[in-house]
Image (cartoon, rainbow, N blue to C red):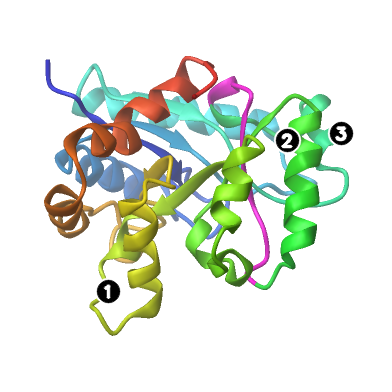
Amino acid sequence: MTEYIIDIHAHILPGIDDGSTNLEESAQMLDKAFNQGIHTIIATPHFKRKQNLDQLKALINDLIKEAKKIDPDFRIFLGQELLYFDSLVDYLKEGKALTLANSRYVLVEFMPDVIYNNLYQWVRKILMAGYLPVIAHVERYHCLKKEGRLQELISIGCYLQMNYRSVQGNIFDANARWCKKALINQYIHFLSTDMHHINYRTPVIDKSMDWLKRNLNAEYLSAITSQNANSIIENQVLR
């Protein structure tokens, strides 16, 4: 059986945030993603306090219909990318903010210049409420570049998501070097596209996959592109 890629971070809902502009663009993004081997996507629009959750659910149903036109087994789920704020846990408990695919997993982001002590305390707050934080595009936070901090977050129960395109830089790209080292050390749990548009921040991952296949063992690569994400879909705790 062929193992397909699962993408847990995608701004593919049309007209909601800085991602896809309309359903036509979303359909094109779905087609391009599918052709890259991505056969399951969790749509993760940015959280807004005054959002209309019924609208999000209607749009996800439109997206599911478009995916089924491409392939009947193409799966689409709903989630959100949540920029941390003080009342986030309350919003989650009240169903006003969404987890990933109706699981206990929460895709949470922070400002790039977040102070590490704050980030640490905030993810602990999410954990203590019974949720499983997945830190979005972990490569963006300056405070996590310090040696040992990824390991510390993993040790308390956090999961780390990295964007595929972040490994594409050359040896002179410090961020790409850091990303590659984190992957080689197997600190990353999920790779995602963080796709936004058909021509910019796209679903294309083939160049990244070339590097990943050359430099990571097959078991770990399978875990971070598919198997770990399936634990989210199944709402199972990832060990």
Q: Is residue 194 visible?
A: no
Which picture quadrant has residue 33? top left
Amino acid under label 1?
A: Gly
The local crowd at label 2, few if under 14, some if 14 to 19, many if 20 or more residues have their Cα within 10 Å, is many
Q: Which residues are magenta?
A: 101-112
Mark 2, residue position = 97
Please name which of the two marks, 1 or 3, marks the residue nearer to the observer: 1
N-terminal label among 1 and 2: 2
Examine the rendered structure and indicate whether residue 111 appears above or below residue 6.
below
Classify mark 2: helix, strand or loop.
Answer: loop
Q: Residue furthest front?
A: 148
Examine the rendered structure and indicate whether residue 43 appears above or below residue 192.
above
Q: Position of residue 110 (x, y in %)?
A: 67, 59
Q: Is residue 9 visible?
A: yes
Residue 169 is marked as 1
Residue at the image point whose x is 29% and y is 40% from the top: 30
